[in-house]
Amino acid sequence: MSPLQQWLTMAVFMVAAMALAWHWQRRHANAGIVDVVWALGMGGSALLIAATGQGAWVPRACLAVMAGVWSLRLASHVWRRVRQEEDGRYRALRERWHGHQGKFFGLFMFQAGLVMLFSLPFLAVGASPAQGLPVSLGLAVWLAALTGEGVADRQLDRFRDDPAHRGQTCRDGLWRYSRHPNYFFEWCHWFGYVALAWGSPLAWLSWLGPVLMYVFLRWISGIPFTEQQALRTRGDDYREYQRRTSAFFPWFPKS
């Protein structure tokens, strides 16, 4: 398949997948499923490109493993959080939109479009001739980032599971140095695909991963929505946390 054919195939698949997810949301009043399907869609896109790409088999195999494992870990983590209760961010949207299903459908289709946007770096890897050092570097970056994100998620889950911490802000482990260490390592993981795309005729597309992910996490759909919800539920405790703790890049707290 050519990169354009791969991309159009993914578009058809994601529109259908998000339409089904929207229908599930409508029945269960739980829009958190959109994040699960987004993560799985990213992994599915990577597997399609790895299987049908025209580049060397080594970077394509690494793409399948790296994006596949990352996708499944993220989807399972999100599913454990949303399967019983809708995420607070989406509950707030539901109240603001008065449950308007047309707007929710637009949200789900927007997320399908984001899969198409964030899968562009995978197209660069699918056409890559990379071997040796770039592949090793890509795997090392991916492993370090995935480990960091997993540690941050476990620390937060452990804190939230303790009823004594209700209404409090997690400052344990990595959360002492960044308000969003999970987002930071999520961003870092995209540099692994930049390394895998070394020498690709589409290498420039690989840089869209870290650039776009930083923009979305920092200013659009990540930190702003998460912190609005945190301020609603934790109030002054979270405001103090904001004052002392770096928003994204890990750093020592202010005294």
Image: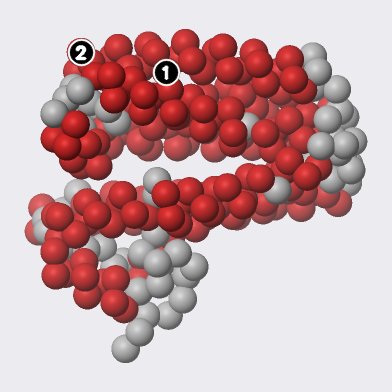
- The span from disc 1 to disc 2 (Cα, nearest Å) is 14 Å
Q: Name above or below for residue 183 compared with residue 172.
A: above
Q: Please, what is the three-letter code of the amino acid marked with disc 2?
A: Arg
Residue 12 or residue 179, whichever sits in front: 12
Considering every residue shown, the one lying at the far bottom of the view is 255
| Residue 203: image location, x then y, percent | 81, 42
Q: Are marks 1 and 2 in contact (CB under 8 Å)?
A: no
Q: Which residue is mark 1?
A: 18
Identify the image's colour scheme: rainbow, by chain, secondary structure or one colour: secondary structure
| Residue 145 visible somewhere in the drawing | no
Quadrant into which the C terminus falls: bottom left
The residue depicted at 69 percent of the width and 38 percent of the height is 121
Of the image marks 1 and 2, the number of the one nearer the N terminus? 1
On screen, residue 26 versus residue 214, left or right, reads left
On screen, residue 96 versus residue 175, left or right, reads left
| Residue 139: image location, x then y, percent | 71, 46
Q: Which residue is mark 2?
A: 27
